[in-house]
């Protein structure tokens, strides 16, 4: 059975790129959310094995770490695996400090480390 992934805050081309990458490497279904509120509602109503948060949301300029904090503060969603999508080391460190799993940047999609990190959740 495919794992469910929520991809939050990506622009159209980046969402397509990430979706292609994920479906080529894992048995997954992917849903996109554009905003913080849409992401919180989707996670609470639909359930996901993994939530990918863009560092800065394309549609609103919101920060993914704010959605991470909200997810981790709600008992029903606190245990869901979350990764930040960012090439910036300091952003990754902040996300991990807030409870995310180590994430990845779009520039490192094909890196073995990225596949390993995602495999830990999606296989």
Image (tube, rainbow, N blue to C red):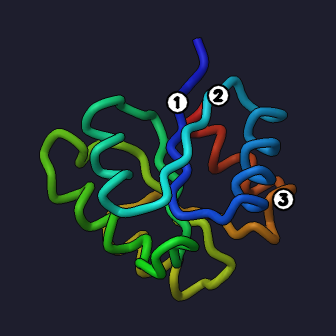
Query: CB of mark 3 within 8 Å of CB of mark 2?
Result: no
Work out which residue is located at the far front of the displayed protein and give it: 59
Rendering coords of residue 104 (x, y %): 66, 65
Whether residues under marks 3 and 1 lie with C-beta atoms below 8 angstroms apart, the answer is no
For disc 1, the neighbor class at 10 Å (few under 14, some 14 to 19, many from 20) is some
Quadrant of res 121 = top right
- Residue at 26% x, 67% y is 69
- Please report whichever mark, 3 or 1, sits nearer to the chain's N-terminal start: 1
Q: Residue at x 86, y 56 (%)?
A: 110
Identify the residue under disc 1.
4
> Spatial distance from mark 3 to mark 2, Cα to Cα?
19 Å
Foreground residue among 101 and 6:
6
As helix, strand or loop, the secondary structure at mark 1 comes to strand
Point out the frontmost of discs 3 and 2. Answer: 2
> How many other residues sit within 10 Å of disc 2, few (<14), some (14-19) or many (≥20)?
some
The numbered mark at residue 111 is 3
Give the alpha-carbon distance from disc 3 to disc 1, as whole Å: 22 Å
Q: Which mark is residue 28?
A: 2
Which residue reaches farthest bottom?
90
Residue sitting at x 63%, y 50%: 117
Labels 2 & 1 near each other (Cβ < 8 A): yes
Sequence-wise first label, 2 or 1: 1
Q: Is residue 102 above or below residue 76?
A: below
Element under disc 2: strand
Is 49 on the left or on the right of 99, as rendered? Answer: right
Query: Which of labels 3 and 1 is toward the front?
Result: 1
The quadrant of the rendering that contains the N terminus is top right
Image-quadrant location for residue 75: top left
* Above or below, comparing residue 23 to residue 34 in the picture: above
CA separation, marks 2 and 1? 6 Å
Locate residue 70, reporting x and y percent. 23, 62
């Amino acid at each position: 059975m495919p794992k469910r992934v929520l991809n939050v805050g990506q622009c159209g081309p980046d969402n397509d790129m990430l979706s292609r990458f994920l479906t080529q490497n894992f048995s997954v279904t992917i849903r996109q959310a554009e905003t913080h509120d849409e992401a919180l509602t989707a996670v609470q109503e639909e359930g996901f094995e993994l939530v990918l948060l863009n560092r800065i949301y394309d549609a609103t300029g919101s920060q993914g770490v704010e959605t991470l904090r909200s997810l981790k503060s709600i008992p029903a969603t606190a245990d869901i695996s979350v990764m930040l999508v960012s090439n910036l080391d300091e952003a990754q460190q902040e996300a991990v400090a807030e409870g995310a799993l180590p994430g990845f940047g779009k520039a490192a999609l094909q890196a073995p480390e990225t596949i390993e990190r995602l495999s830990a959740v999606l296989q």
